[in-house]
Image: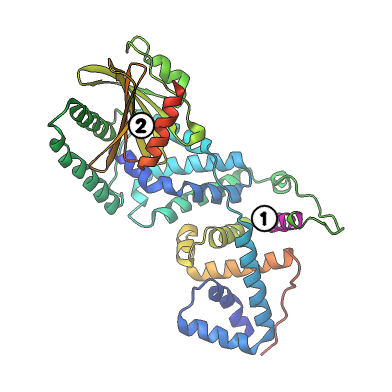
Amino acid sequence: MDTKVRIFELTMWPHMRAAYNLARWLVRNDHDAEDIVQESFLKAYKAQESFRGSEAKTWMLSIVRNTAMDFLRRYKSPITMTLDEPGYEPQDDSPDPERVLLEQSRRDRVRQAISHLEPEFREAIVLREIEGLSYKEIAAVLNIPMGTVMSRLSRARNLLLVELGGTKEVQHDLR
Amino acid sequence: MTCAEAGPLLHARLDNELDMAGAASIDLHLSDCRACAAQYTALENLHQEITEADLAYTPGIALERKLAARFLEEEKSPTRFWRWNWLNASVMAAAAVAVVAAIVSIPMLRTGRETETVAAEILDNHLRALQAVHQVDVPSSDQHTVKPWFQGKTAFSPPVPDLTKDDFILIGGRLEVIHQQPAAAIVYRRRQHVIDLYVSPSAGSDSKTQLRDLGGYHLLRWTQNNLNYWAVSDVDPSDLRTFADLIRVTR
């Protein structure tokens, strides 16, 4: 095997999990996410000019993100928007005696709420809350200014708070 | 600071993205404004809830396997054109140091018993294969392609188990000559580490596994059913033992 191939692997292989996670959240099904990751890794492999020793992870994730967004633009349809994750029935109103089930359903609700965000908000939440990236890293992945990262996160989280109930949009005192 | 100004900055505060002065001014506002304080608590709870929900998706082993296969195809493609000037210099340097260290240590092994000579030969071979474009003669992650390929090329049939579920991914096989004997090299991958398994005929009796460390690489050898086995890699020795154990039970 080519040394260069090995070095590519050493540099990029460790980011496959993060790449898959982002792709999976953006396209919202396993099969397409795998295709996105494969396409992204091959693109990364060939796109030598655009990688200039910056963070390998953010570089890889930006390729995944752009590939996934292209995919969504091409194939986005009302059907794929609603036929998302199976098993999300409306919640039963009666209290569930099993605490585990309650926690499970709450977890599913969080997952569902994020999944229903528009892609530009979803990707910000996934990169920050699930991947734990800094604003600087998110800015690099999404190719937007850090201030925009902050405002997207702000909007995304407020939408999540409303979606998950419990909290309404807060009324602020006017000063 | 007004609430409108504080709004987005609450997120920067939550995400530890503010400097000390910025954080202090937000904290001052929070101590002063119940609405923003309530909002901040809600955001903290949301953050905690998402974290605890552990929402990351994990790729299946099949993805890595498919990707490895795609890269092998790329490698075989005659139109490929490498330009790797973009590579992270530190990774390159680290790899170079590892290889040099391994090579420097090899001459010291060329004395003494025959097994030591063979060990050095095996490691030479492994290192050469790592550097070469020609890593495998039969690139396939399918054991039913790799195993029959050796028929007629070697007088024995090497084991080629499918160890995907144990996270050892078959890359392929190639023919080698080790100590003037034809040998089968079966190539697996463990994450980013390549493991070569060399199999050649032996007149000796069965033996247990013996581990050797040479210049950052590990070699595990044993004899079983009139075949000598050498597993060599820079993978963690415990992973190499697991690998050897899996091969041993295949026979």
Rendered residue at 55%/40% (across/down): B60
Residue type, numbered disc 2 = Glu
Residue at 28% x, 40% y: name it: B217
The question of residue B131 being in magenta is answered with no
A50 or A93: nearer the viewer: A93
In the displayed structure image, the side of residue A90 where residue A77 appears, left or right: left
Q: Residue at x 45, y 66 (%)?
A: A136
**In the figure, is residue A30 to the left or right of A52?**
right
Q: Is residue B55 left or right of residue B65?
A: right
- B194 is higher (above) or lower (below) than A79: above
Residue found at the very far right of the displayed protein: A94
B190 or B64: nearer the viewer: B190
Quarter of the image with the N terminus of chain B is bottom right
Q: Position of residue B30 (x, y in %)?
A: 61, 85
Read off the magenta span: A101-115
Do we see residue A120 in this rendering? yes
Mark 1 residue element: helix
**B47 is higher (above) or lower (below) than B150:** below
* Helix, strand or loop for the magenta stretch, by majority: helix
Where residue B194 sits in the image (x, y, percent)? Answer: 35, 36
> Pointer 2 indicates a residue of which chain?
B
Residue at image location 62% in from the left, 88% down from the top: B31
The image shows residue A71 at horizontal and vertical percentages of 57, 45
Tag 2–tag 1 contact (CB < 8 Å): no
Residue B71 appears in the figure: no
Q: Amino acid at mark 1?
A: Arg
